[in-house]
């Protein structure tokens, strides 16, 4: 079903940690331009970068009151576990930049490597993704589906991203399977995100952000 144009578009700022995420954001920005205004900084950076931008950069600070959502697009690894409390504090401060209603903060997280999220555009899988070797195998597996893929390559990432409808379904399956392991909620909550970060099981939440964009046109 084609998505209908809406006059009032949500304003979304996306912060990210890698070049592949950057290109994927650009795909979303182009594909959903009729229903949302998606902006990203020119360089990588996550929570500290977002707070700095909204504190001192006029392009962010002056638009805080009309910002609807802030997204963070990044991989989750065991080294991120000790960072959770500081990141949660940053999230709570960012929410308060807009008073009524507060800004919604979404975490677009994928275990281990962004290639797992990209692989879900072709087929469902949920292997371990903790070691360098496991991540390399996932990248090689992705290349069997899209041989031209390279990190940060716009053409191949746009080609993969075009299959986002399949990724939404596979991503939802990847996340919901963790209910049996104790996942407290499918929906975005601080409790759920903490559980995902600290347990480091294979999952992705990127599909929920894209599902939101799709819903804007329905």
Image (cartoon, rainbow, N blue to C red):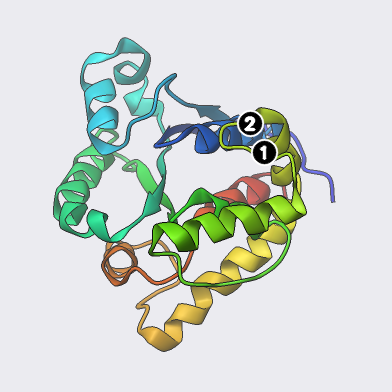
Q: Secondary structure at mark 2?
A: loop
Q: Residue at x 21, y 47 (%)?
A: 87
Give the vertical position of 117 relative to 51 (above or below): below
Q: Which mark is residue 153?
A: 2
Q: Are marks 1 and 2 in contact (CB under 8 Å)?
A: yes
Q: Which mark is residue 208?
A: none
Give the vertical position of 117 relative to 181 (above or below): above
Q: Secondary structure at mark 1?
A: helix
Q: Which mark is residue 157?
A: 1
In the visual, does 180 lie left or right of 88? Answer: right
The furthest residue to the bottom:
180
Q: Classify mark 1: residues with Cα within 10 Å, few (<14), some (14-19) or many (20+).
A: many
The furthest residue to the right:
1
Does residue 204 appear in this view?
no
Mark 1 to mark 2: distance in Å? 6 Å
Q: Residue at x 27, y 28 (%)?
A: 49
Residue 15 position, x and y percent, is: 40, 34
In the visual, does 22 lie left or right of 84? Answer: right
Residue 86 position, x and y percent, is: 14, 48
Q: Residue at x 37, y 78 (%)?
A: 183
Give the vertical position of 126 relative to 217 (above or below): below
In the visual, does 12 lie left or right of 48? Answer: right
Q: Residue at x 59, y 73 (%)?
A: 173
């Amino acid at each position: 079903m084609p998505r209908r144009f809406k006059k009032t578009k949500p304003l979304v700022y996306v912060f990210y940690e890698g070049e592949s995420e950057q290109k994927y954001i650009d795909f979303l920005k182009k594909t959903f331009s009729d229903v949302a205004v998606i902006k990203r900084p020119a360089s990588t950076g996550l929570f500290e970068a977002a707070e700095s931008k909204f504190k001192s950069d006029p392009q962010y600070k002056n638009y805080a009151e009309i910002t609807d959502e802030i997204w963070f697009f990044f991989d989750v690894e065991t080294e991120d576990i000790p960072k959770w409390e500081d990141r949660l504090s940053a999230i709570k401060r960012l929410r308060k930049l807009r008073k009524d209603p507060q800004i919604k903060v979404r975490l677009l997280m994928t275990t281990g490597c962004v290639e797992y999220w990209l692989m879900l555009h072709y087929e469902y899988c949920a292997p371990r993704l903790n070691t360098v070797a496991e991540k390399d195998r996932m990248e090689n597996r992705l290349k069997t589906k899209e041989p031209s893929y390279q990190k940060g390559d716009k053409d191949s990432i746009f080609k993969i991203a075009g299959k986002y409808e399949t990724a939404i379904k596979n991503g939802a399956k990847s996340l919901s399977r963790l209910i049996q392991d104790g996942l407290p909620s499918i929906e975005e909550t601080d409790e759920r995100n903490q559980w995902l970060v600290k347990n480091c099981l294979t999952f992705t939440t990127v599909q929920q952000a894209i599902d939101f964009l799709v819903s804007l046109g329905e």
